[in-house]
Amino acid sequence: DTGVSQDPRHKITKRGQNVTFRCDPISEHNRLYWYRQTLGQGPEFLTYFQNEAQLEKSRLLSDRFSAERPKGSFSTLEIQRTEQGDSAMYLCASSPLLSPGEQFFGPGTRLTVL
Amino acid sequence: TQLLEQSPQFLSIQEGENLTVYCNSSSVFSSLQWYRQEPGEGPVLLVTVVTGGEVKKLKRLTFQFGDARKDSSLHITAAQPGDTGLYLCAGASGGSNYKLTFGKGTLLTVNP
């Protein structure tokens, strides 16, 4: 068990550029989640996959955000036309099917939009 | 909107002292998780509690879930500098019990 991994760990981009983040969950976990965390706040739920199906998207996820999990394994989160307000830590988590609340987080991707 | 209030927000103590942090909500949760987060890293899961009144111990850490499953506490005995970090509670709810709602956290500093 190697845990949840995320890539890249840090991303600096200019406003208006597109960025894509990758998450590799714990291999036997069916469920995968994306959260966003800003300074001084706890993580906020963005979206959730069970296998390859995206089952819920938060209202925080504007049309510029899209997430995929094409084969039910790794997931990608893309942000188009980035804005300074997108600067945050993007966290991925996974959980086993029978204990959905028991979520294991990756190290996160720190996004800075200049 | 479900909210989790954590208190205190900041706590600075000396090595060897005991402390308790609290997590309160007006909502009922199907499970409650405690995490510890270090700067620049993702939260690390410490414990999951699911039954009202449940108490779990992890070495010097004791976690309690309220009888009504609306609140929780974390007690640390004889704190050590290695306990320093941001402690987050997160409740799971919803039809599929998958969406975690986090508190803002308690930032603990244990001074040697």
Image (cartoon, coloured by chain):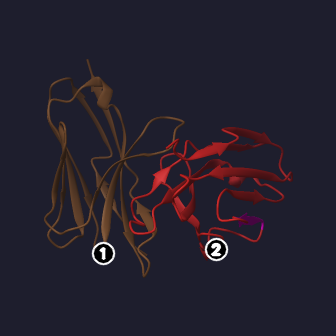
Chain colours: A red, B brown
* Nearest the eye: B96 or A24: A24
x and y, in percent, of residue A67 in the image = 71, 65
Image disc number at residue B27: 1
Label 2 is placed on what type of residue?
A: Gln
x and y, in percent, of residue A75 in the image = 68, 58
| In the image, residue A114 lies in the stretch drawn in magenta | no
The quadrant of the rendering that contains the C terminus of chain B is top left
Which type of secondary structure does the marked residue at label 2 adopt?
Answer: strand
Look at the image and give the residue range highlighted in magenta.
Answer: A64-68
Which type of secondary structure does the marked residue at label 1 adopt?
Answer: loop
Callout in the foreground (2, 1) = 2
Image disc number at residue A17: none
x and y, in percent, of residue A95 in the image = 47, 60
Does B108 appear above or below B73? above
Q: Looking at the rendering, which quadrant does residue B18 occupy?
A: top left
Q: Pointers 2 and 1 in contact (CB under 8 A)?
A: no
Few, some or many residues within 10 Å of mark 2 (<14, 14–19, 20+): some
Label 1 is placed on what type of residue?
A: Ser
